[in-house]
Image (tube, grey):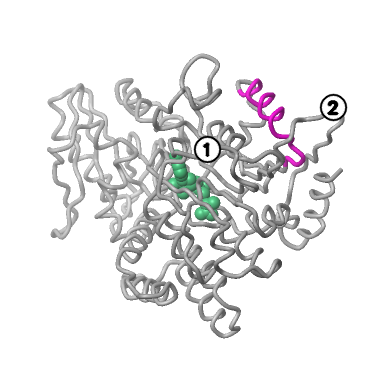
Amino acid sequence: MRRRAKPSGKPTTRVRQILTQLGYVEHEDFEYEVEIRLYSNRRLYADVMLFQGDAPIAVVEVEGKPSLLREGFEEARFKGAAWNLENPVPLLWVAAGERDALYRLTRPCNGICYAPLSEQTLPQALAPAQLATLIGDYLQQTDAPLGQSLRDRNLLRDALQAASGKDPRTRFVDLLKTLQSQQPKRGASAPLREAHQRVAQARQKGTGDFALASALRYIARAYFRPLVKNDEVRRFGRYYTPDEVIEFLVEVAAPQPEMRILDFACGSGGFLLGAARYLRERRGLSPTAVADSLHGVEIDPHAHALAALALEVGIGAPVAHLYRENALTFAWSEESYDLILSNPPAGSLPDSIAPEQFRYAGKGKNRLNQYEVAFAELAVRLAKPDALIAIVAPEGLLSNASAESFRRWLFRQARPFAILGLPRGLFPHTPSRMYALVMRKTPLRKRDRCLIAELSRYDLTANRPALVQLVQEAMHA
Ligand SMILES: C[S@@+](CC[C@H](N)C(=O)[O-])C[C@H]1O[C@@H](n2cnc3c(N)ncnc32)[C@H](O)[C@@H]1O
């Protein structure tokens, strides 16, 4: 059984069009002609297979006439089962002429059975955002990476809801216990195992609560992993920001007491936690003073709950200004933050935004309907004069020709003094190259200099102190 990385020429134009509309065709992972070898050495070819990573999620069988639907189903069923007897392909789509039928793997059953999915229309069922939900029940019982991710995501969601201890530390330990007790027989996922190890280390070393808080954030990685193209994780840009990027930008920003610090898309609270640790350990601020200086907004309820818990565990005091809101429509008071640290979402804006609030972001002539543009504009609006803005942004913001006039405007509002390419692979779930963009809200002067560099992983780890110094020198040049 194997998969040939060769695009199929076979499916009818209609099937191709449907897949294109649903967003599969341009995604190289999704469409392959697949050869399935049987033990008897007979070969079967699936017309199209839809994949998530290496896990097949649907067999598409294409027949010429509607009368061949039954035969098409038998073929597809055979191929779905022959792919892997232990983990058959969960969904079949038979396209016979103009007629379509969908079938879902059912369990338990003697042998491998597929049942028609009468309640779903084709676009509904195959829409990438729905697929994970549709086949999720089945996938969660398998070893497929998608199944593991779904298990992790749901476990975390349930455990967060169930964690009810009185103080944050007990809630955190409760959460881990729930996660551990709910782990299916297949064993704990890698992030959870590592979180447990980190907790054990933190207890042994007595290094305090920030280690526990990062362990808590760490288990959330599964929650921040897109499962299929266009699923909600991708649509809302819910990517986990790696610790080394957070620590680097926090050290560059070197937060001071009394500063009002903001992350307007705070996810699991990585940047706020990093800033809190800096203020506690390097500036000696009290837990309440630290908690008071932090401000966060996050649209996703689970990420918000996670951030609240992680911050309270880390700091030892709750952060009052942590809002579960849409940052793009939030009632902000303008020019009120001294430091903005964030890795906002990137990509197309899913909803329309109020055009009067944004000069460049949104739909319409001379506008860009992109998250990164909206959040960069927002950063300029919310930063006090002279405030520091350190954000993670996709390459497009810095290089796309369509964003040129926006960039010119942005850099006139906020002077960039470091544009740093982050190592490839650090953000594995987005195809875009990511950059750290460090700016100060002062107008650009004629002779201003900007440090532009490509960073390696070494730069963000062992070489970090030297790099931080270099960026700070650029900042004060
Ligand atoms: C790249 S993630 C940030 C990850 C975060 N730095 C961390 O360490 O966990 C972007 C976050 O923005 C959130 N988000 C997306 N749209 C938003 C909006 N309109 N307002 C506020 N948050 C939003 C997503 O839910 C996601 O958690």
Residue 222 got which mark? none
Q: Is residue 108 magenta?
A: no
Q: Residue placed at 49% from the left, 61% from the top?
A: 319
Q: Residue placed at 75% from the left, 55% from the top?
A: 459
Q: CA distance from mark 1 to mark 2?
A: 31 Å
What amino acid type is highlighted by mark number 1? Ala
Quarter occupied by residue 144: bottom left
Quarter occupied by residue 294: bottom right
Element type at marker 1? Answer: loop
Which residue matches tag 2?
446
Query: Is residue 46 something one can see in this rendering?
Result: yes
Q: Position of residue 441 (x, y in %)?
A: 70, 37
Quarter occupied by residue 247: bottom right
* Disc nearer the start of the sequence (1/2): 1
Q: Position of residue 171 (x, y in %)?
A: 39, 73
Q: Residue placed at 50% from the left, 51% from the top?
A: 296
What amino acid type is highlighted by mark number 2? Lys
| Placement of the C terminus among the 4 image quadrants | top right
Indicate left or right for 189 with 419 as reference: left
Does the numbered disc 1 mark a residue whose Cβ is under 8 Å from ligand 1?
yes
Which residue matches tag 1?
346
Q: Position of residue 216 (x, y in %)?
A: 48, 67
- The magenta region covers 403-419
Q: Give the dominant element type of the magenta stretch: helix, strand or loop.
A: helix
Element type at marker 2? Answer: loop
Is residue 307 or residue 102 the one in the foreground?
A: 307
Is residue 327 or residue 198 the one in the foreground?
A: 327
